[in-house]
Image (tube, coloured by chain):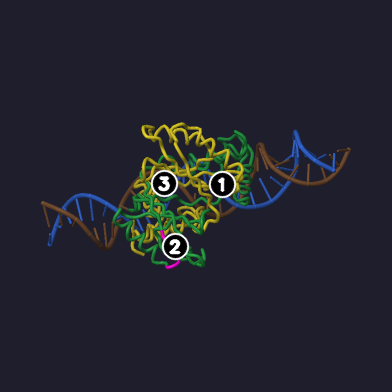
Chain colours: A yellow, B green, C blue, D brown
Amino acid sequence: MDDLDSRLLDLFAVEPRIGVLEASRRLGVARGTVQARLDRLATTGVITGWGPELSPEALGFPVTAFLTLEIRQGAGHDSIAAHLETIPEVIEACTITGAGDMWARVVARSNADLQRVIDQVLAEPGIERSTTVIALATQIPHRVLPLARVAVGR
Amino acid sequence: MDDLDSRLLDLFAVEPRIGVLEASRRLGVARGTVQARLDRLATTGVITGWGPELSPEALGFPVTAFLTLEIRQGAGHDSIAAHLETIPEVIEACTITGAGDMWARVVARSNADLQRVIDQVLAEPGIERSTTVIALATQIPHRVLPLARVAVGR
DNA sequence: CGAAACGTTGAGCAGGTTGCACAGTGGAGC
DNA sequence: GCTCCACTGTGCAACCTGCTCAACGTTTCG
């Protein structure tokens, strides 16, 4: 990661479909350089993918909620995770600090529909209790780009 | 959104760099159809971008934490959000249900570094209290694709 | 100091891809 | 029956990609 990498990421973040050649022109470097940089960023794991980003809202799931799950002593995280994975509305989950807890981001078609999703999550007997917090408005949408800048000291 | 759209998204999620022509071959439809579908998915907001996905870990920020911020009565969410936006390590933030609360996802270079980030967040006087939860292991990485399937009834 | 390793540059090439246009087809709705 | 609309298949020029190559400057290290 150096300054050129960072500017390269900036460029592709703003105009993802420009292609290697156009990027090399914008940055004033050779095409092979851009290609090499992108390859390296991909192999070092900085770039994890180029897939299309989808909007749950546009897909009909405008409600987002965060669930904090309390896991029963003895119940493995993995079996809970496996259960969560079968629910499409669970779009993210991780274990967190605190007594055997997990955190999950879920979406739903409406507040009423959220109840259905939560019930589905709680169908797993390993989950003892859960707290739900509904997300109201997005203040800062998911962003990683600023990190790339500070990572190279810009 | 119909079945073809869904399969198109699947395809590009797995192999993002295949291009329109190759996608049309895989799906057994005309190239113009794929082009039209992608255009429509983009204009209707289902596809929000094609930018490279970056890994905070690979950028040197392996620690993820969730902050719940309690906002002082009278302090506007917007000023808090503006403050959070200036901190690169805050990679997501939204308002949530509960007495004037906000939620933020932050990353840091280490647990010690996390303290620095939190201090930076709390520099805003509008924030009264905060709770920190550290993410340990990712059980389900952010995924939206399954939603596209259920959205069309697959 | 000199050699080796490395990244960058600019060039070339065949092959594939894109953007665009066009006319024809078939189904849905009126 | 008619219109609208999406899909199809075709064609074209222009462009881009993946790949290779030799040459050059920097950095590293014996």
- Marking on residue A48: 3
- Range of the magenta residues? B125-129
Quadrant where the N terminus of chain A is found in the figure: bottom left
Q: Position of residue B117 (x, y in %)?
A: 35, 60
Q: Which of B76/B154 is in front? A: B76
- Chain of the residue that carries numbered disc 1 in the rendered image: A
Q: Residue at x 46, y 31 (%)?
A: A125
- Chain of the residue that carries numbered disc 3 in the rendered image: A
Asked whether disc 3 touches disc 1, contact meaning CB atoms under 8 Å apart, the reply is no
Callout 3, which amino acid? Thr
- Marking on residue A56: 1
Name the element at disc 3: strand
Query: Magenta stretch: residue B2 in it?
Result: no
Callout 2 crowding tier (Cα within 10 Å): few <14, some 14–19, many ≥20: many
Name the element at disc 2: helix
Q: Compared to B73, does A66 lie above or below?
A: above
Q: Position of residue B20 (x, y in %)?
A: 56, 43
Left or right, residue A130 beside residue B118: right
